[in-house]
């Protein structure tokens, strides 16, 4: 009897240790697995559709969409190379794939996430120049130039992800709260200098650039909209005057010529006839312009 009671307590303590180690019980692990698998599948399918759409649709095969394809590829790498192992790591509560796979996984994680953020940053810069300098930048936005931008994004992301793999090294163990060393850990290098370099170059600097650039895009877009509204109101006023002249009983030259001056002043007659012809030409021009706008 005493042995059975001791065995029960031993099993309970083992179960508690297992729950504490993984952080989840069996039901929670199943629910979290289903949610994470759905997120992974959705991410893979969505980014593949983006790449296929740009490759197959002729109107989308433009240099301005090269950065979008690069962004989709970086997110696809996250979904295929990073998220599945991260899911196992989260559910198990320990790293079970060894140090070599850990180093590769951490490197792919930093590379893909950094490339995704830098692609977003470059897309914001590209949109800024496309809005503020449409004619000048439209000529410079060639396929070769955009491919160079994409290569620079991935090279800079590699410069951030490779130092832990080649020089510094990642973390494969840590001291837990109870003082024991846990050797089933996989973390990116916790070196202070590298952490400062990585966080500044892969997050804070791109975030600052995007915030500034999108604020400038907002101001430029608002200025363009206001200018278009002023031009449209000015044009509508001209159209209204032209329609009012037409509804007033004949073209403007008839109204001007109906006021016949005295024959003793022929220069006044010539002046008024030239003014009438000028008004007629302006009226015809505004009428044609209104038709173009309405069409």
Image (cartoon, rainbow, N blue to C red):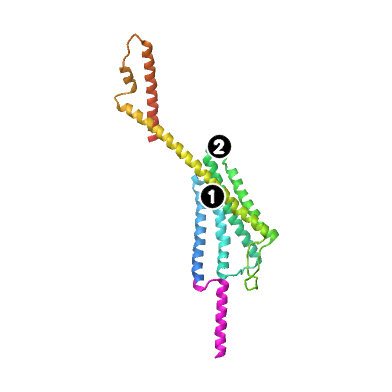
Q: Nearer the viewer's eye, disc 2 or disc 1? A: 2
User: Which image quadrant: the N terminus?
Assistant: bottom right
| In the image, residue 19 lies in the stretch drawn in magenta | yes
| In the image, residue 78 lies in the stretch drawn in magenta | no
Q: Which mark is residue 179?
A: none
Q: Are marks 2 and 1 in contact (CB under 8 Å)?
A: no
Q: Residue furthest left?
A: 249
Q: Does dot 1 land on a helix, a strand or a loop?
A: helix
Can residue 110 be seen here? yes
Q: What are the residue bounds of the magenta stretch?
A: 1-27
Q: Position of residue 249 (x, y in %)?
A: 29, 24
Q: Which residue is mark 2?
A: 136
Q: Which residue is mark 1?
A: 68
Q: Relative to residue 21, is residue 188 depicted above or below?
A: above
Q: Is residue 243 left or right of residue 145?
A: left
**How far, Cα to Cα, is label 2 from label 1?**
22 Å
SS assignment for the magenta stretch, majority? helix
Disc 2 residue crowd, few under 14, some 14–19, many 20+, Cα 10 Å? few
The residue positioned 37% from the left and 35% from the top of the image is 294
Q: Position of residue 232 (x, y in %)?
A: 41, 35
Q: Does dot 2 land on a helix, a strand or a loop?
A: helix
Q: Relative to residue 189, is residue 271 depicted above or below?
A: above
Q: Position of residue 174 (x, y in %)?
A: 65, 68
* Earlier sequence position, callout 2 versus callout 1: 1
Q: Position of residue 252 (x, y in %)?
A: 34, 22
Q: Relative to residue 34, is residue 218 depicted above or below?
A: above
The residue positioned 64% from the left and 58% from the top of the image is 195
Q: Choose between 65 and 184: the one closer to the eye.
A: 184
The residue positioned 50% from the left and 71% from the top of the image is 28
């Amino acid at each position: 009897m005493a042995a059975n009671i001791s065995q029960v307590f031993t099993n309970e303590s083992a179960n508690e240790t297992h729950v504490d180690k993984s952080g989840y019980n069996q039901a929670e692990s199943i629910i979290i697995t289903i949610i994470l698998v759905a997120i992974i599948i959705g991410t893979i399918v969505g980014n593949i559709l983006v790449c296929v759409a740009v490759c197959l649709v002729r109107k989308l095969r433009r240099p301005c969409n090269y950065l979008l394809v690069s962004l989709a590829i970086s997110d696809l790498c996250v979904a295929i190379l990073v998220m599945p192992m991260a899911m196992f790591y989260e559910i198990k509560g320990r790293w079970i794939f060894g140090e070599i796979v850990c180093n590769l996984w951490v490197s792919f994680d930093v590379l893909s996430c950094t490339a995704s953020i830098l692609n977003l940053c470059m897309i914001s810069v590209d949109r800024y120049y496309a809005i503020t300098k449409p004619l000048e930048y439209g000529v410079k936005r060639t396929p070769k130039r955009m491919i160079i931008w994409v290569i620079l994004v991935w090279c800079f992301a590699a410069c951030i992800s490779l130092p832990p793999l080649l020089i510094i090294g990642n973390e494969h163990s840590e001291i837990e709260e109870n003082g024991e060393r846990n050797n089933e850990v996989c973390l990116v290098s916790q070196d202070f200098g590298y952490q400062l370099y990585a966080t500044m170059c892969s997050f804070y600097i791109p975030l600052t650039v995007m915030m500034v650039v999108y604020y400038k895009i907002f101001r430029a877009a608002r200025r363009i909209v206001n200018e278009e509204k002023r031009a449209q109101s000015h044009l509508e006023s001209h159209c209204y005057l032209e329609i009012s002249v037409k509804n007033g009983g004949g073209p403007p030259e008839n109204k001007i010529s109906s006021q016949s001056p005295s024959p003793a002043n022929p220069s006044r007659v010539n002046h008024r006839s030239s003014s009438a012809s000028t008004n007629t030409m302006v009226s015809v021009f505004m009428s044609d312009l209104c038709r173009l706008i309405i069409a």
